[in-house]
Amino acid sequence: MPSITQDTSLQTVLTTFETSPANCPALMEELRAAYSDFISRQPGFVSAALHVNDAQTRVANYSQWRTRDDFKDMLKTDEMRERHQRINALCRGFEPVMYEVFATHHA
């Protein structure tokens, strides 16, 4: 389970996907399979969470990695390149962006 804390040394990656209600179930399954079968087994992977909006037009993915290089190395694999092609066919586009946690707030 992702843990969001300001004092972490982990690399945070937020990826947003634009899709359609017709393609959303297949996209979610493709992403679920990518994490369970491949991504979660890569060096440096820590955790991830998938989120979908009510309209099923946007998917957000929050993932944590030990380092930037671990994330980049995963993206360079033949396996992930093949998966990206399938994912890309199910959405209008997606963009992974690396972030550092600036602040957190709790009740």
Image (tube, rainbow, N blue to C red):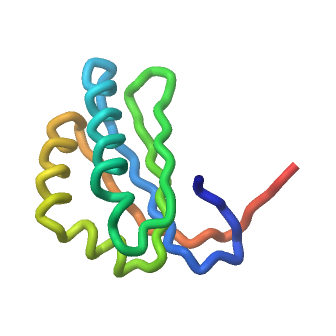
Residue 40 location, x and y as percent? Answer: 38, 58
Task: Give the residue displayed 47% in from the left and 58% down from the top.
Answer: 63
Residue 24 figure quarter: top left
Asked whether, in this view, residue 74 is left or right of residue 48, the answer is left
Residue extending furthest toward the right: 107
Asked whether, in this view, residue 67 is left or right of residue 28, the answer is right
Asked whether, in this view, residue 2 is left or right of residue 80, the answer is right
Q: How many marks?
A: 0
Residue 99 location, x and y as percent? Answer: 51, 68
From what the image shows, is residue 101 above or below residue 48? below
Residue 38 location, x and y as percent? Answer: 28, 56
Task: Give the residue displayed 15% in from the left and 42% down from the top.
Answer: 86
Asked whether, in this view, residue 79 is left or right of residue 94, the answer is left
Task: Give the residue displayed 27% in from the left and 18% down from the top.
Answer: 22
Q: Nearer the viewer, residue 34 or 90?
A: 34
From what the image shows, is residue 56 above or below residue 94? above
Task: Give the residue displayed 59% in from the left and 53% down from the top.
Answer: 1
From what the image shows, is residue 60 above or below residue 4? above
Residue 35 location, x and y as percent? Answer: 35, 50
